[in-house]
């Protein structure tokens, strides 16, 4: 590993830690040690568990020079806190290097952080064929060893040409086979018992469950070919560089590209059609699952994934920040009186309620029906008819039920008249 370091800087760093004849350090050397350790700690904290960033990008991110980054890398190597490795760089003669952090050797990293770091290097010892031939139990054991957080997902059920979700909403579910079958917010994957509890869902209860990954410690690019995702990805790669295809699985209408990056990103990537990214506080359907089209999710290539291109990660952060600011401004404006869309007196089949307006307009309709004196079940019947004919796309039945319940709390027109007389 030392052969990969700059020899001049390596000798200078070693010299900083050489003791004087009396066995101590001069004040100037102590100051240099302190400065070097501070920069080394900053670099260590900033890097991902497997860092592919160039020295120029690291220097820009930490607002230091590239030479200072070389010093910090050398310091971390000499103290066994990182390992530097080389990998082929396409057809180029000069190989790429990447830095692997020694998380367990760092006393400042707590146990929860250690267990949340995915051990992607385990995949390098597996062949695609071996992984595809594994049983569900063997794959789940592998995911636990890698620190991949997996949960059981509901699965599609096929009957007489129709497809249903195994959840309580059945055919009315708007995410068939693509959502968790357990409550995920309070799961603690730093405990082995959590993994065992999840595995029991397949081995002891219903092995038809789909497999889902919580993407808290990775990012997955979801390419939907049917919606133009292949063209969007091609355009994106022209601007930011090729995405690594080390770890890829197919999906119902496209494929998933796994990366070692972690982002706070919008679900839809800059509005590119057919291209989503799933990372923190999200989840993705994994292989050994069934798509509602009838296709199986299967691994297509298996090796330790690489991060997303640096420039793309920076733009994702900027986009997420912009959306966060917009969300905050909407929250500040939420106390202002709401301007409702004016509904037609008679809603015909030609009247379309698009996504984004469905909640507001259905609630207005429910309140209008309540004003006529209708009860919960009568209001729900009206909403179901409107939802089936006019909502594009329709909402799930649970939202209709909650809307009808909220409307029932409003007074009828007769009750309002009585209140005015009193």
Image: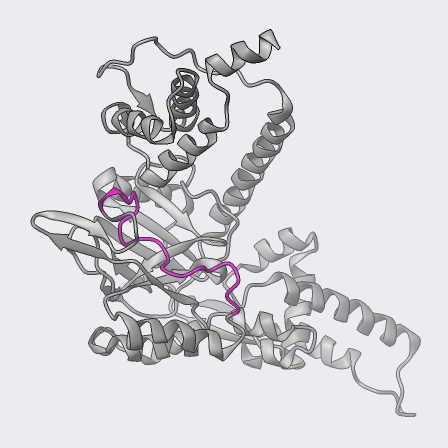
Is 200 part of what is drawn in magenta? no
Q: Quadrant of the C terminus?
A: top right
The secondary structure making up most of the magenta span is loop
Residue 350 figure quarter:
top left
**Residue lying at the far left of the rendered structure:** 160
Image point 54% across, 35% down: which residue?
323
Q: Is residue 123 visible?
A: no
**Residue lying at the far bottom of the rendered structure:** 22
Image point 65% across, 28% down: which residue?
332
Q: Nearer the viewer, residue 158 or 354?
A: 158
The relative height of residue 118 versus residue 215 in the rendered view (above or below) is below
Q: Is residue 135 visible?
A: yes
Is 182 part of what is drawn in magenta? yes
Residue 243 figure quarter:
bottom left
Q: Which residues are magenta?
A: 171-188
Q: Position of residue 413 (x, y in %)?
A: 47, 13
Image point 25% across, 66% down: which residue?
288
Q: Nearer the viewer, residue 160 or 6?
A: 160
Report the side of 412 relative to 233 (left or right): right
Q: Position of residue 39 (x, y in %)?
A: 73, 65
The relative height of residue 395 versus residue 93 in the rendered view (above or below) is above
Q: Position of residue 159 (x, y in %)?
A: 11, 52
The relative height of residue 321 versus residue 36 in the rendered view (above or below) is above
Q: Quadrant of the N terminus?
A: bottom right
Residue 83 figure quarter:
bottom right
């Amino acid at each position: 590993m030392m052969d990969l370091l700059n020899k001049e800087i390596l000798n200078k760093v070693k010299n900083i830690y050489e003791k004087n004849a009396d066995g101590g350090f001069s004040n100037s050397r102590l100051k240099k040690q302190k400065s070097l350790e501070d920069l080394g700690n900053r670099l260590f904290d900033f890097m991902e568990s497997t860092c592919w960033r160039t020295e120029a990008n690291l220097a820009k991110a930490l607002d230091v020079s590239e030479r200072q980054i070389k010093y910090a890398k050398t310091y971390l190597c000499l103290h066994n806190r990182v390992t530097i490795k080389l990998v082929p760089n396409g057809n180029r003669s000069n190989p790429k290097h990447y830095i692997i952090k020694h998380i367990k050797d760092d006393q400042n990293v707590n146990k929860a952080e250690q267990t949340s770091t995915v051990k992607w290097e385990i995949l390098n010892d597996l062949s695609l064929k071996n992984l595809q031939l594994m049983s569900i139990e063997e794959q789940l054991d592998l995911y636990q060893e890698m620190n991949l957080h997996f949960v059981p997902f509901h699965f599609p059920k096929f009957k007489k040409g129709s497809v249903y979700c195994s959840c309580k909403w059945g055919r009315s579910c708007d995410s068939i086979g693509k959502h968790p079958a357990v409550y995920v917010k309070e799961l603690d994957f730093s405990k082995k018992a959590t993994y065992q509890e999840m595995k029991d869902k397949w081995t002891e209860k219903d092995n038809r469950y789909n497999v889902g990954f919580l993407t808290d410690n990775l990012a997955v690019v979801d390419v939907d070919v049917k919606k133009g995702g292949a063209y969007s990805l091609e355009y994106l790669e022209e601007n930011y560089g090729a995405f690594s295809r080390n770890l890829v699985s197919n999906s119902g209408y496209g494929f998933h590209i796994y990366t070692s990056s972690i982002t706070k990103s919008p679900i839809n990537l800059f509005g590119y059609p057919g291209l989503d990214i799933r990372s923190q506080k999200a989840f993705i359907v994994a292989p050994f699952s069934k798509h509602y089209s009838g296709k199986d999710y299967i691994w297509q290539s298996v090796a330790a994934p690489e991060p997303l291109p640096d420039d793309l990660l920076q733009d994702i952060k900027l986009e997420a920040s912009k959306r966060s600011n917009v969300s905050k401004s909407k929250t500040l404006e939420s106390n202002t009186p709401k301007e409702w869309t004016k509904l037609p007196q008679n809603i015909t089949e030609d009247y379309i309620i698009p996504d984004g307006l469905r909640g507001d307009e259905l609630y207005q309709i429910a309140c209008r029906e309540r004003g006529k004196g209708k009860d919960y079940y009568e209001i729900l019947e009206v909403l179901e008819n409107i939802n089936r004919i006019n909502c594009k796309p329709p909402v799930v039945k649970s939202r209709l039920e909650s809307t009808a319940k909220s409307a029932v709390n409003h007074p009828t027109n007769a009750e309002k008249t009585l209140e005015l007389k009193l």
